[in-house]
Image: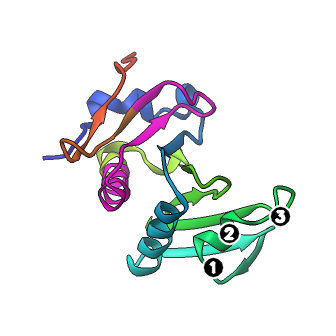
Amino acid sequence: MPDLLWDDVRDFFDPELMGALPDVCVAGASVEDWQVVFDLVRSSGWTWEYSVGGVAGSLPSAAEVLSRPADAETVDLQVWPVPDVLVIFRPMSGDEIDFDFDLHELQGQAGVDVLCDFLCTIGRRLGKPVAMTAEGDYGNPVLGFDPVIDRVVLLADPLLS
């Protein structure tokens, strides 16, 4: 049985209500946790691309990425856990793992399942909660992976139009 059902969460997947690129975060992270994510990306079989300032390159260690000067070029780690679904990690801080995805790519039960699978994979590997908020609304998570019960759960009441 899926962690979440489309009919229960469709408003949380509405780009008009949530913003097209909701924010996903693993708080209380470390450079070591970022390295775990980098290793997962390398070993998962997912398609991925690392770029600095828009120029593709090889994925260095997390310590190297996170020790760059504050004014350095922007770093993106683009990951396609399945074809046509892009997740973008932005390693800017060692204490938080941030990423987002485009809700337009996650419609219907299949999209909910892809998101839940991805959040579970990240959360299980790190052993930490993973929370999704509306774009720019960092303090109010709507759903996320709970490592205690090992599944994705609702963290807010759906708006249900």
Q: Is residue 97 above or below residue 154?
A: below
Q: Which residue is mark 1?
A: 60
Kind of residue sitting beneath label 3 = Glu
Kind of residue sitting beneath label 2 = Val
| Membership of 121 in magenta stretch | yes
Secondary structure, mark 1, is loop
Q: Residue at x 54, y 74 (%)?
A: 48
The percent coordinates of residue 8 (x first, y second) are 28, 28
Residue in front for this viewpoint, 160 or 66: 66
Q: Which residue is mark 2?
A: 65
Instruction: Find the distance from the CA under tag 2 to the CA under tag 1.
Output: 7 Å
The percent coordinates of residue 97 (x first, y second) are 53, 52
Q: Quadrant of residue 152?
A: top left
The percent coordinates of residue 144 (x first, y second) are 36, 39
Give the residues in magenta. 114-142
Q: Which mark is residue 97?
A: none
